Image: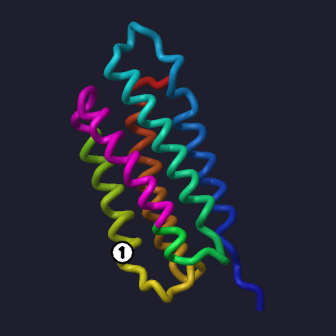
Amino acid sequence: MRQPTARPSRLALLGALGLALAGCGADTTDAVGEDTAAACEALAAYTEDVEDLVRVLGPDATVAEVQAARDQAAETQQALHESIADVTDDRTDDVARAWDSLVTAFDAVDSDTTLAEAAAGLQDEAQSVVDATASVAEDLDCS
């Protein structure tokens, strides 16, 4: 019997990330301010690393490969946290909580577990990160 894949949810996750944060980056006007521009740039970098993490999630990936991608996203998450703290303190906690939940979910997966076995829970946690980050992008008007 063929096991269902999580491909549609991964595609939805990628789509949500792309749509929510597509406008962030170097085109931010001077009127928005330097702190907001830096936060939008950090959002774009974080989005790229989270998208890489989602791409790694697959039936043939090992937990170690996914954790390496997660570690890279963790670096940009820290930069994002610092950048958005300068412009929207109330949202930094939302993103940090979502990220911490995702990290906890990864840490709870045994290294011998297949990604197919762990993917559903990880994708739910990743969606929470996407949602929190999209809210920040909307608050900052990163377009």
Res 138 → quadrant:
top left
Horizontal relation, residue 142 to residue 101: left or right: right
Disc 1 crowd rating (10 Å Cα; few below 14, some 14-19, many 20+) is few
Residue that appears at 38% across and 71% down: 105
Query: Which of the pair 119/63 is nearer the observer?
Result: 63
Horizontal relation, residue 37 to residue 45: left or right: left
| Outermost residue, right side | 1
Name the chief secondary structure element in magenta. helix
**What's the magenta region?**
68-90
Residue that appears at 46% across and 44% down: 46
Q: Name the residue under label 1.
A: 107
Instruction: From the top left corner, tell me how far across and down residue 15 is, in percent.
Output: 63, 46
Instruction: From the top left corner, tell me how far across and down residue 62 is, in percent.
Output: 57, 77
Query: Identity of the amino acid at label 1?
Result: Asp
Residue 103 is covered by the magenta coloring: no
Instruction: From the top left corner, tell me how far across and down residue 72 is, in percent.
Output: 45, 55
Residue that appears at 38% across and 54% down: 74
